[in-house]
Amino acid sequence: MTGTRLTLTGLVLSTGCAPVAKALIDFWQCNDVGEYDNAGFHLRGHQFSAPDGSYTLETVYPGLYPGRTRHIHVKVQAPNRPVLTTQLYFPDEPRNASDGIYRPELLADLLDASPAKRAAFDFVLDLG
């Protein structure tokens, strides 16, 4: 697949900062030119958090399409709990300011920019 490689890592935690093991994390995104694959479903998938709450996603840096900034869609669900549906965004993107769905609290930390990108984001679930 073409595009800049992106490795996204992080934790799934409770509001009390305890790791959440076996949380279902569902990711989907467009490719590097801003197209979603609705036929073969590339760049869509899920995984479970590790016993320490960690996860790693290896993908490509999402492209731009009309009206949106770069983002990755995510659903996170602790076992037998409600689903959190959200999107992750990237810092220093010119379209962040004009995207009506963008939220700065959902910025991934960009750890490395070249040649491949590394980013981090921790999901916090209210399990109370």
Image: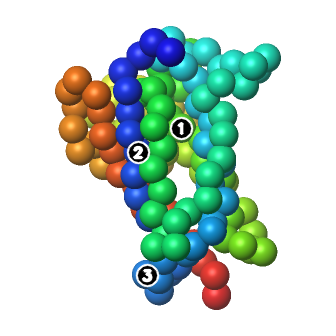
Q: Count neighbours of disc 3 (C-alpha within 10 A) and say few if under 14, some if 14 to 19, many if 20 or more.
A: few
Which numbered tag is attached to residue 17?
3
The picture places residue 6, in percent across and down from the top left corner, at: 38, 33
Say which quarter of the image contains residue 113: top left
Give the label, 3 or 2, closer to the camera. 2
Q: Which quarter of the image is occupied by the C terminus?
A: bottom right
Residue type at numbered disc 1 = Ile
Give the label, 2 or 1, closer to the camera. 2
Which coloring applies here? rainbow
Above-or-below relation of 126 to 59: below
Which numbered tag is attached to residue 5?
none
Above-or-below relation of 33 to 122: above
Q: Count neighbours of disc 1 (C-alpha within 10 A) and say few if under 14, some if 14 to 19, many if 20 or more.
A: some
Kindly report the distance in space between the C-alpha atoms of the residues bearing marks 3 and 1. Answer: 24 Å
Q: Secondary structure at mark 1?
A: strand
* Residue 28 seen in render: yes
Mark found first going from the N terminus, 3 or 2: 2
User: What residue is pinned by disc 1?
Assistant: 72
Q: Residue at x 33, y 44 (%)?
A: 119
* Residue 107 seen in render: no
Residue type at numbered disc 2 = Leu
Callout 3–callout 1 Cβ contact below 8 Å = no
Q: Residue furthest front?
A: 51
Which numbered tag is attached to residue 8?
2
Residue type at numbered disc 3 = Cys
